[in-house]
Image: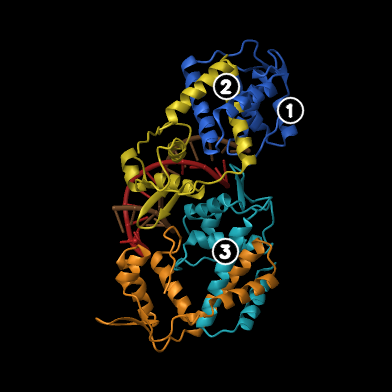
Chain colours: A yellow, B blue, C cyan, D orange, E red, F brown
Amino acid sequence: MQLAINPGDEVPIYRQICRQITDLIAGGRLGPGEKLPSHRELAARLVIAPLTVKKAYDVLEAEGFLGTQRGRGTYVSLTLPAIDPALLRERLRESARRLVREATLGDVSLDEIVELLRDVTQEMKP
Amino acid sequence: MQLAINPGDEVPIYRQICRQITDLIAGGRLGPGEKLPSHRELAARLVIAPLTVKKAYDVLEAEGFLGTQRGRGTYVSLTLPAIDPALLRERLRESARRLVREATLGDVSLDEIVELLRDVTQEMKP
Amino acid sequence: MQLAINPGDEVPIYRQICRQITDLIAGGRLGPGEKLPSHRELAARLVIAPLTVKKAYDVLEAEGFLGTQRGRGTYVSLTLPAIDPALLRERLRESARRLVREATLGDVSLDEIVELLRDVTQEMKP
Amino acid sequence: MQLAINPGDEVPIYRQICRQITDLIAGGRLGPGEKLPSHRELAARLVIAPLTVKKAYDVLEAEGFLGTQRGRGTYVSLTLPAIDPALLRERLRESARRLVREATLGDVSLDEIVELLRDVTQEMKP
DNA sequence: GTGGTCTAGACCACC
DNA sequence: GTGGTCTAGACCACG
């Protein structure tokens, strides 16, 4: 598992980790039951404080993506969380609106956006 | 001009205001030269602190979307800011990635996303 | 709001706080929309580290009992979380089993247990 | 003897084992003098480390529920331990409080809880 | 002043 | 070794 964090970024480190791990899961590069590095090890690799990684793991566990077993480690959940369809729709709408807003301000056409989406999808698939 | 803010949201109130105003501009519902309500008035309408609206206006002015004329009020800039193409590309990519990530986790196909984008675009146009 | 924590206890401090706050909510002594003390203030009162209280608040927020607004404070949610009925049943069953087990080992009759439940209920109501 | 453990649970595995064995004793399904499987055998059956089962047996022996005879195995004690009444009362109170808390949050009436208790009691008797 | 994040370091329980 | 908890202290962003 390979993550890249950017300490100077506006989005907090622990959220960057969350985002990248859910990306890996969504892309199938992290499968159900797979073991993650211990929070200490990952912290050492990323050269950040262990608690920061642990917070990311905690959030993902609360959201149902990960499960931990004391003394044994942290694993990808066997059953990924079902999302409330109404909530999902609203989230997607908001993200779509954001994308369109940014595109409009930059004079980027809808077709170019669709192209970009395909590109990004390829990038994320395993 | 009609805005809706959500105090409990993760994104700060002043940014919610910024976002919605740029939305209105991008959608053409706020044209160049148009006058905005005073920050005090808008604050009263939204039931928040005037300083919060002021901060939003300040940010938008710094970004070139708005201009203020002392004693006369705040107006939409006559010439909207040109955005650094590289920065724009990166922002779009990130937003696209986010959309794809959410769609994948929710089992929503790319075609459905494209449909959603068209829908949202219609909604935002004046 | 008045809490009592026991640092030597087997159950972690932050969970003691969670438990007592949900108790207050369940008993109606903390109503929807009510403001909680800041995590720093509560920490000072309980003579523990602020982060410990914050963790409790974070957990309760993730569970839907509390909501926070940056710069303004932490409040009891206006809409308390709906619990999955199946999950609830299982939890209740497990708690009931535990109670019966302890009672059996101590030769306490079911009637005495019912009496105890009434007693405890009174104690928790406002 | 049939146990079910859940590695992902918040309560440690060795305590899950303790709890279930005391359950069996309290319910009469494990009588005084009865032989338990060796810790190695039980560990193999549960697919966990032998040391974990050993720890559970050790705790139960320390509490007086089990007795071991070197080279012969582990047995249920002929005389079950008397429990400190004050400690018992406090434990019962806490478990009762927990049950009431969960019931209140889930809008379950006290009568339904009493019904549930009778049900569970039946289930646990041999 | 309030919450949000990060750090460094400690001790414990579990497997 | 792993995760779980707690501390003391720092800096930032928000309202």
Q: Residues within 10 Å of mark 2 (few under 14, many from 20)?
A: many
Q: Is residue B14 above or below residue C68?
A: above
Q: Secondary structure at mark 2?
A: helix
Q: Secondary structure at mark 3?
A: helix
Name the residue nearer the viewer: B29 or A82.
A82
Image coordinates of residue D29 in percent, x first then y, are 47, 80
Residue C91 - label: 3
Across and down, in percent, residue E9 comes to 31, 52
Dot 1 amino acid type = Gln
Provide the residue designation for mark 2.
Answer: A102
Q: Is residue D46 left or right of residue C53?
A: left
Label 2 close to label 3 by CB (< 8 Å): no
Q: CA distance from mark 2 to mark 3?
A: 47 Å
**Mark 3 or mark 1: which is in front?**
3
The outermost residue toward the top is B79
Tell me the quarter of the image containing the N terminus of chain D: bottom left
Q: Nearer the viewer, residue D88 or B115?
A: B115
Image-based side of D56 in relation to D96, left or right = left
In this view of the protein, can residue D8 be seen by the observer?
Answer: yes
Label 1 crowd bin: few (<14), some (14–19), many (20+), radius 10 Å = few
Q: What is the distance, in whole Å, between disc 1 and disc 2 at their CAs?
A: 20 Å
Q: Quadrant of residue A3?
A: top left
Q: Looking at the picture, does residue D116 appear above or below residue B32?
A: below
Circles 3 and 1 in contact, beta carbons < 8 Å: no
Q: Which mark is residue C120?
A: none
Number of the front mark, 1 or 2: 2
The numbered mark 2 sits on a residue in which chain? A
| Amino acid under disc 3 | Arg
